[in-house]
Amino acid sequence: MPQTTTVSNTDANRNSKMSKTKIWINSLRLFTLPISLAGIIMGTLLAASYGKFSLLVFIFSLLTTACLHLLCNVANDYGDAIRNNDVGDRFGEVYVRYVQDGLLSLQEVKKMIIYLTIASCVFGALMIFFAFGWTIKLPHIIFFALGGFAVYGAIAYTNGKKPYGYKALGDLSVFIFFGIATVAGSFILQTSNFELSILLPAAALGMPIVGLLNNNNIRDLETDIKAGKITIAYKLGLKGARIYQFILLSLTFILSSIYVVLHYSSIFQWLFLLALIPFAKYAIGIYKSKTEVEYRIQENFIPICVLIFSILYGIGFYVGA
């Protein structure tokens, strides 16, 4: 059970001024949605470059991914809260622990987890049926199984007896769910076909998203150590984690370039290199960051970088097809 936390007068005054809607918006961390929607956009545009596109599949792919992403955010906070590691949304010396500061109860958060799980399943089912038809076949079964695994992965990250997010497996799960699954999955849903090389741009997109998690883990090193939460950043140390971050960002452009070379047909396919500008700014920011405020600024910036990269990459292939 979590320890009882005394809410200060300052916290109480702040909490009373926050509407429930604003609290939920902050708790859901909507600003992080681009990192999951980017994969759907990239995979769909790559499929469109082959002349394959379904608007309904695209819409329900976005809705399913958004619900799974928000489910992950809420379940993550819930798991941290019951382990007394609710670091919440922080900025400098002021931070909000949504559960421990009394803004949200565990029961409210649990209900939201249920709602988002149901929404993920409903939208996911519609996505699969619109993609493969209404008669159950092998592709339906495979994607239903993958969907169930995605829901489990979102919840089990910080929940259960052995949360894998506390065992340095967070980076791998983020890479699989936000990189491989979103790009390759949306490509398959649109084309009903799988090609091995699609894993290159999928992996490329997953790298900076893992970098976002690594950024947060660097920021939370002291808190995670106290809570017994083991992360890659914890294992590598501050210097090693920063080198790891540079490697991740480098692989983003290396892997995506290899895919261009393999499927080259137009100079437009190099359009994604324009994303080097915001990524370079992000990399410099991470290198210079020392305080929690500075790491928070980078955390808010990387979803924009990822979205820009995915759109430029997809458009480059679509226009150059």
Image (cartoon, grey):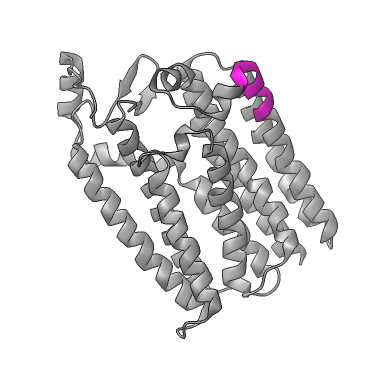
The image shows residue 236 at horizontal and vertical percentages of 62, 22
Indicate left or right for 31 with 308 as reference: left
Asked if 72 appears above or below 16 in the picture, the reply is: below
State which region is magenta: 236-245
Quarter of the rendering containing residue 119: bottom left
Q: In the rendered structure, does residue 79 fall within the stretch colored magenta?
A: no
238 falls in the magenta region: yes
Residue 306, compared with residue 128, is above or below; it is above
Count the labels in the image.
0
Judged left or right of residue 226, residue 245 is right
The C terminus appears in which quarter of the rendering?
Answer: bottom right
* Residue closer to the observer: 61 or 268: 61
Q: Give the residue displayed 18% in from the left and 22% down from the top.
A: 4
Whether residue 55 is visible here, answered yes or no, is: no
| Residue 302 appears left or right of 83 | right
Secondary structure of the magenta portion, mostly? Answer: helix
Residue 223, image x and y in percent?
Answer: 41, 19
Q: Residue furthest front?
A: 161
Residue that appears at 53% across and 70% down: 142
